[in-house]
Amino acid sequence: MNAPSKFRYISTDRRVREDRRFVVGKGRYIADLAAEGMLHVALVASQHAAANIKSIDASKALAMPGVHAVIDGAELAAASEPLMNGLDTPNVRRHPLAVGATRYMGEWVAAVVADTRALAEDAAELVEVEYEALPFVIDAEEAYTPASTPVHPAHGSNVLLDRVFNWGDIDEHFAASERQLSLRVTWGRNSTVPIETFGVLAQWDPWGQVLDVRASIQMPKYADQIARALRLPMNGVRVHYDVDVGGSYGVKRGIKHSVLVGYLARKLGRPVRLIEDRLENMRSGDAHGPERIFDIDVAFNSDGVINSMKMRALDNAGAYAGRAPFQLGKPIGAIVGPYRIKSVRYHAVSVTTNKAVEEAVRGFGQSPTNYAIETMVDRVAEAVGLDKVEVRRRNLIRKEEFPYLIPSGTRYDSGDYHAVIDKTLAHVGWRELVAERDALRARGLLAGIGIAACLEPSGGNSSFEPLLNPKNTTTTWMESCRLNVDALGTVNVAIHTTSSGQGHETLVATAVGEALEIDPDKIRVTRPDSLSSLPGNSPVGSRMAIMLGGAAFHAAQKLKAKIVAIAARRLGCAPEAAVYREGAVFHGDREVSWDDIVTIAHRHFHELPEGAEPGLESTYIMQTPTGLELPTADGRVQMYPCHSFEFHVVLVVIDPDLGKPELRRYVIGHDCGTVINPHIVKGMTLGGIAHGIGATLLEEFVYDAEGQMMSQSFMDYLMPSAHEVPRVEIVHHCTPSPLTVFGQKGSGESGYLGAPAAVSGAINDATRPLGVRFNKLPIRVGALADAVADAREQRKDSAP
Amino acid sequence: MKAAPFEYSRPSSVAEACELLTRDEDARIIAGGQTLVPMMAMRLARPTRLVDIARIPELAFIRDDSDAIVVGGATRQAALERHASLAARLPLLARALPWVGHAATRNRGTVGGSIANADPAAEIPLVLVTLDGSIRARSTRDDKVIAADDLFEGPMATALALDACLTEVRFPTWSHARMGSAFQEISARHGDFAYVSAAAQVALDGDGKCVACAIGVGGATAAPTRLKAASAALLGGRLDDAATREAIAAEIAALDIMIDPHASPAYRRRVAVTLAHRVVIAAHDEALSRTPA
């Protein structure tokens, strides 16, 4: 750390309180929850890329003992509203079970409810569905053409979003630049694929008229969406947040599952649980990440200074809309990366295809965008014949320029990119690393160094919603916290969301402990259900350190003010003259202790200040620090408030005959402002890098030309293991954010946002002497080796 | 991902197991279950009955014969990996076993199971073919020895009858003083099925001339392939680099290479030559480092 700590608990080496229950295997996940008389669901899935449903005959399934119901899309659609679309695309209707037609392989056609999951699967095999195969489209470029078969005929085309943003004097900057180049890079369809698949348990209480929902969820407005879809009042849905979520990083949205199970629980009067199996999760969990083609034109000078960029991003959203197209919007808040690019044309296109539905994935579109930007900067360096670190240095925003307004309307809060890079390269030993690479090359190996300088926008607000959907005028994306000091003086903090590994209990205990100057381990953190909760938007957009940490801190400050007011009355002084310290309040040499204050608040109304309510409680509903305005007509908007920075350095070695990249060295310089808990940030960063390595080298949901999904299990969808992920060295730097209570920024997406750019850059550096380039992720062993072999063959042929 | 309904039997003898297999042609043997259980969970395999041989005492043994190590069909891979004489007597197998799945799967997976499953990329079948080993298979009809050469017929296909139980596996040992071996493979991740694997065992005389040579490649072809012509060509010589590569390349050029989405046939053919060449050279170098008898 570069700054001496002014904190008592923040940034200190303290245990993550959640780890205790996870490490001993006492987490409480959806599969650990059962209700008396609970029934189980299995799905009947379409095997067609697109088809009309001619008939569904469930009679054989229903005849099986232990089978309680088989429902189809028609029945469910009659009793529910279509699921929410992010964009204004009312004719792209999405229901939990297909209605009339199926639009991707694996789509759910019917749900079978039985005494056990195994029985439900047996019965699902007996449901006879007659299909009529329909034309389909798999490729995004093809889907973008007017002649393509629309996935939703009522929508009229496959285009969900097609908008060109012009920020700044693009044409002028292009005309004035000495050089230009164009490139295309493609981000393959991958996701986060947590070990725990999505699961939901719903129970209808007919006497209380309330639907109790427990789910492994990470979803903003989850209760709202269930209520709307099932036509229940929102206070007729009670979501329980005290469920541990076994991994998510965006994808645990499960809204179709939840609406389906909620309906079944009401219909059958029994608790119903659906936990996806791996096949359902991979092919029909509606949880694939972005699949994106970037076409870039960049204008720059011979000294490597980049002036302007034109980027078209074409995203393959899959068969339905959901929130996925917004993943083209969030990167607008960091569309120039950490660079002083003066103007940008951004053409955002989202199309439907007959693939599984895209959902939010770690970074919400930022990692693919960073990969495109960083590959572009590498190309510029190559074109002007300069070192790629030097070209970055020449383009990076300087620390004295913050707050820095980028062309698309977002102001970056703070940063010191040059310092992070210098510090990281000093740690690496840059010259030695280059020498090591060259020595490896001299031994006949392919060796390359990759770097990436990337931003993590954090503190998620909703600015991309009104930007991409004019009917959406949301300008708040609040988060809340409530504190209560009980009658015996212990502190209780309520948070209003589930957590999927982010350590929110540690976060709020640390923030409240810091504010109240009391040991965080003595603070109880609880999760009331949604009916007892204050408004919030769940852990998305790398926001909770900023928003939940901020709400907890502010709630504690309010509480402290009450405490001081109570004590001041006993001390006979003005509250301003009293001093709060470690739970007690002082005036001169006189003190009112914590216990005394608790006694007054809970038992001595006669001692309370005039107008004070008894008890010691406070709540704080925090608005995001930025994003308070609607977008301008030309599409400029303040996106996320805070901007973490990361700088990756990777050395890759490849045996040219075998083609398997070995990551010999991995160093990341990381600046997320004030770190609240170092262990949590480290875990996020290491996991993010592993995730990025997977996206670069291994992970892809592959569809064949017939629309059949080829990677439906971990046999074919390859996740990096401990063997593939190298030891990572982390270099810390701290540039506090001026917009947050402790100077903290987000870190939930760290590592993942730069690893693909860096690893891909290293491979390209390794194969550059052969004239071989890889512009598409993932870069697979076989393809890499084949390209190298071809290049060597050509060299041999052309040699004299 | 729940298996379709099935019956389960746990016989206490091979005779009883064979009896159960005879009675139901859709019954299948289960031993370690590391392949069969996931296949059943995905309902890609639907046996009517599982005959669990994992606890039959006569199938779990490792025996040091004078010219071979003989392993019971249901012996765990991990047990073989830890067998005291393995590194000295069957160094090629000792080098191959750590590549079989992961430590956790080797604790459950059996030696016979890997062979009966006959994945083209599996390591134990490759070693068995390379060393020209054999298996013994018993049914209610007969009890016969099948040479490795005759056993593997293609991906997941063997000469084992459906009602037969693989009772033992015979890995021949060599007695040469100057012997070396090597095993290499390439896959996307450690523990995955190999795109290509290669095994070699080489013995030299006091002058450094090759007196015995076994080379095999896996993953590239529908079943593990012993490079007999290349092995024969190298006998009697001193294994120079270029000649070795040429002999291997010539034989691999004539092989039918598998086609699947994970790696191109060109890749598999090229890498088969590279790895086979590398393992022969490594085995040769190791043999050369040993003192003549």
Image (tube, rainbow, N blue to C red):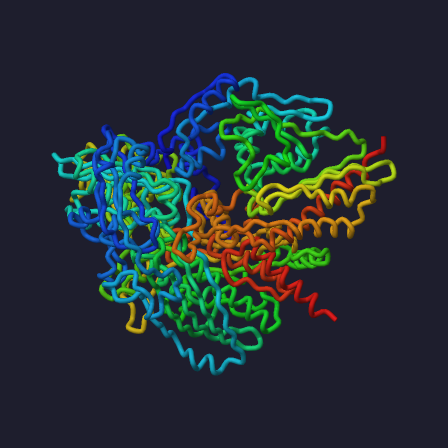
Q: How far from the left and from the top, in percent, is residue A755? A: 51, 55
Counting labels gives 0
Residue A678 or A207: which is nearer the viewer? Answer: A207
Residue extending furthest left? A207
* Up-down relation of residue A458 to residue A616 (above or below): below
Q: How far from the left and from the top, in percent, is residue A412? A: 41, 63
Left or right? Give the position of A30 relative to A655: left
Residue A681 or A750: which is nearer the viewer? Answer: A750
Residue located at (59% from left, 52% from top): A661
Q: How far from the left and from the top, in percent, is residue A718? A: 49, 47
Q: Quadrant of the C terminus of chain A?
A: bottom right
* Up-down relation of residue A290 to residue A172 (above or below): above
Residue located at (65% from left, 27% from top): B170
Left or right? Give the position of B54 relative to B182: left
Residue A253 or B80: which is nearer the viewer? Answer: B80
Q: Quadrant of residue A509?
A: top left
Q: How far from the left and from the top, in percent, is residue A309? A: 45, 73
